[in-house]
Amino acid sequence: MILFEKVGKTYPDGTVALKKVDLKIEQGEFIAIIGLSGAGKSTLIRLINKMHPVTDGKLTVNGTVVDDSLVGKDLRKFRRGIGMIFQSFNLIGRTSVLKNVLAARVADIPFFKALLGLYSKEDKIASLNALEQLGILEKAYNRADKLSGGQMQRVALARTIAQDPKIILADEPVASLDPITATQVMRDFEKINKELNITILANMHHVDMALKFATRVIGINDGEIVYDGPASAVDNALLKKVYGRELTDDDIMDN
Amino acid sequence: MEKLKDYVKNIGKYIKGIFIPEQIIIQDGIVVSPPRSVAPYVVIAFVFVSYFAIQATEFSIFEVIYKLFGIDILNNHFEGPWRAMTGWEYLSRYFFPIDYGYWREVISPLVDTIQMSFLGSFIGSAIALPVAFLASSNINKNKFTLTSARAVLTIFRTIPMIIYAVIFVWVFGKNVLPGTMAIGLFTFSIVAKMLFEKIETIDLGSYEAIESTGASKGKSIVTAVLPQILPSFYSMSLYAFEINVRYAAILGYVGAGGIGLILQSNMADLDLTNRVFTMLFFIWIVVISIETISRFLRRRLA
Amino acid sequence: MKKNMKATAIVNETLSREPNHVLIKVIVVSILVALSYWSISSITDVNFNENGVRVARNVIRYFFWPDGTTDQGEPIVLFFFLTLESHGVPYLMYETIMIAFLGTLFGAVLAVPIAFLASKNITGTYVSGFGITLITLIRTMPVFVWAMFFLTIASGAFAGVLAISVTSIGMISKLFIEAIEDIDKGILEALDSTGATTLQKIRYGIIPQLTANFLSTIIYRFEINVKNATILGLVGAGGIGTTMMGAIGSFNFSLVAVCLWGIIPVVFVIEFFSTKIRTKITTGE
Ligand SMILES: Nc1ncnc2c1ncn2[C@@H]1O[C@H](COP(=O)(O)OP(=O)(O)O)[C@@H](O)[C@H]1O
Ligand SMILES: [Mg+2]
């Protein structure tokens, strides 16, 4: 369970990105976070695994209070339970797909093994299983930077699954993919959510995608939550509240 | 004649045209002025600096003529140890007849030179790898260690290698160790510099991704960043090795081991200079071979 | 989707296909270890003594605090560093830079005929092969050897200029050869294309690109040449190296230090601007 209690975030340069956010997220939910660019979606997501520290209020993730005292080893152990997916995939270039997935397990092996790239057989099997679950097992020994965008995001997803997380945070996971590939990747998210009961929080730029796959939608405008409820209850009036304007074609992804 | 007059009349205009390009009138009286070129100013600056440079370096073609042929055109009375001989006589006595048999004595110091270069390049590069991360502003967020690492690299890099060699000879005596250490220090400073510049250009997204899985900073670096820079690192190390072989050949000049040691004694003694060609030939063979191997490997890495 | 860690047949099959680079790694590591071992074996006769430690300590101390004096009792810093006279470090650095400047300039001039000689399309396979061999031969000789050679026909800084000119030829002529071979292609293309004349092609197609490469190469070569010019004094070919090597010979640590005080900032500034300008040229502002 993720619990936000009056959480606020002010960046060191004084930018107030989030104000008094209250949220309660149960295990296994599929949540889409929508809002204009600069609304604070990425900030919200990055607070959860402390890529950015919370500056106000209290954030609890699966019983761990994410505050300034969560550092070093404890922080790293905490992060192992949380996967992260990025818009630009963030794969390791010049290395194979399998090595990319194995990288998710580097947190658990000694430094010299990480340095020499020595992984155990179990790690390899777990990584190959993850690749198989996403249907790209045959690319295991290809170079990751020679794949298509959709395949890259699948590798990133496989990497996250190999990490065996309770929560996956996805920051605009399909924003740089074409509509058809985006839908396929969203299906993968849906599958992972249903079959592995992993909580998914995904920032979405495209509203229709968000409504189609998520069970719950959170709308953010200027650092504040303006909507939090089931995807089925989202209507145009609400969207206007979130976006502060009528939607344009740009906000909808045809498919 | 008319043409010449015309030319003289317009000479001012031509000169002005060099500095301020003439405006071009396209149709309908639209005037376009081409961008001013900096080239003429650069040329003037070059001529100006060259004048001072020639003075400062006492550059004189007459000296060469005098030393080569014994003809003092402007009666400059050039100083020179070989006033009695013309340069050709001198040169021929200097290098000929070539002492072919000398190669036996060249081999051992030459091998020393290769060994010095290899070991120095190897150790220097190995130390450069971790330090380069310390000196990369995108990886190391600690201002103090970052600045210190960079300052150390800058100082080490700007001090000529031969100075290290001299200092190490003072400390360790005349053998191969000072040369090896000098080469190691130099390699360390240039490879670390090239490498941190490379690291600063790479995309750190994957590093962030691995860190987000709970891996420590060190493990994230070796997993996400290292594979991206290793090929460049190997290539830089080989490149340093290439340069070092050429440099190592002269380190012996100050007693730091290798072929330079005998190069100096042979150059200094007029009766021994006919060995020089034999030595140069072998240096040349070694430099070319190592360069060829290194370039082949570097092409493979690219 | 199952979360168990049991491998299916296809996963097992994929695992067995894992590319194995062990052999090549073992070979490379063995070669490196063998070469290291062989190289270390050459380190013999090390006569490390306490005197050496004292010297090393002095080198570092005087580097930061060069408080030695000249024979006349004048502080070294005052007499050599804070003076504009011709024996002082500022003038010697000026001379050093001028050696590099003139060397680069003449190197560029000398590179032109040699580049023509080594261009396949101008002189044919055999002569150009000879030209390329000549360039390699010139380039691979250490600059010191050239300096020693030129000292026989010129003195001091002048010999330094000649040595630097000759060693600069390699890098610069390589650029010219590429340009010359490019121009040839340009002419061929011009024959079957309409529009621009050959001259226009050269003027607008090749020259601008060549100028950028040319500037970039010249600046880089100048940077290298300044570094070389600082040490040419080792063999008596002018520049600050002459004073510095004299100081080294007489164990005058203070003077060595102030010479380095001259070299370090100058080399750093030149390197800094060289890198800056070259990135600006290649990335187009
Ligand atoms: N590292 C940072 N430092 C300062 N301000 C930031 C930083 N990251 C984001 N911001 C600011 O915080 C606000 C919210 O940004 P973000 O969470 O990235 O929005 P979104 O992901 O919804 O586009 C914006 O005004 C942005 O400029
Ligand atoms: Mg964002």
Image: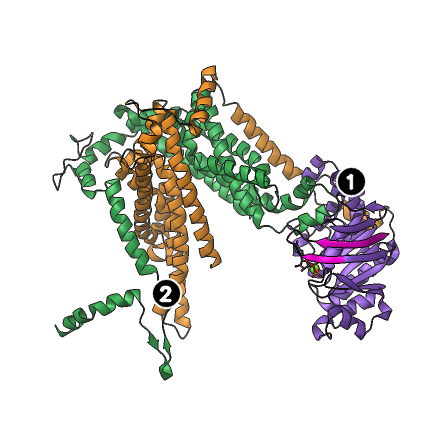
Q: Position of residue C1 (x, y in %)?
A: 87, 55
- Considering every residue shown, the one lying at the far top of the view is C50
Asked if residue C21 lies left or right of residue B167, the reply is right
- Residue, disc 1: A74
Q: Report the quarter where the N terminus of chain B lies.
A: bottom left
Give the quadrant of ligand 2: bottom right
Drawn colour of chain A? purple
- Residue, disc 2: C202
Is C52 one of the magenta-colored residues?
no
Q: Write the start and end of the magenta stretch as one range.
A: A1-19
Is A10 one of the magenta-colored residues?
yes
- Chain seen in green: B
Q: How much space separates mark 2 and mark 1, taking CA atoms? A: 66 Å
| Protein image colouring | by chain
**Please, what is the three-letter code of the amino acid marked with disc 2?**
Ile
- Kindly identify which chain the residue marked by label 1 belongs to: A
How many neighbours does mark 2 have within 10 angstroms: few (below 14), some (14-19), or many (20 or more)? Answer: some
- Chain seen in orange: C
Which image quadrant is residue B57 in?
A: top left
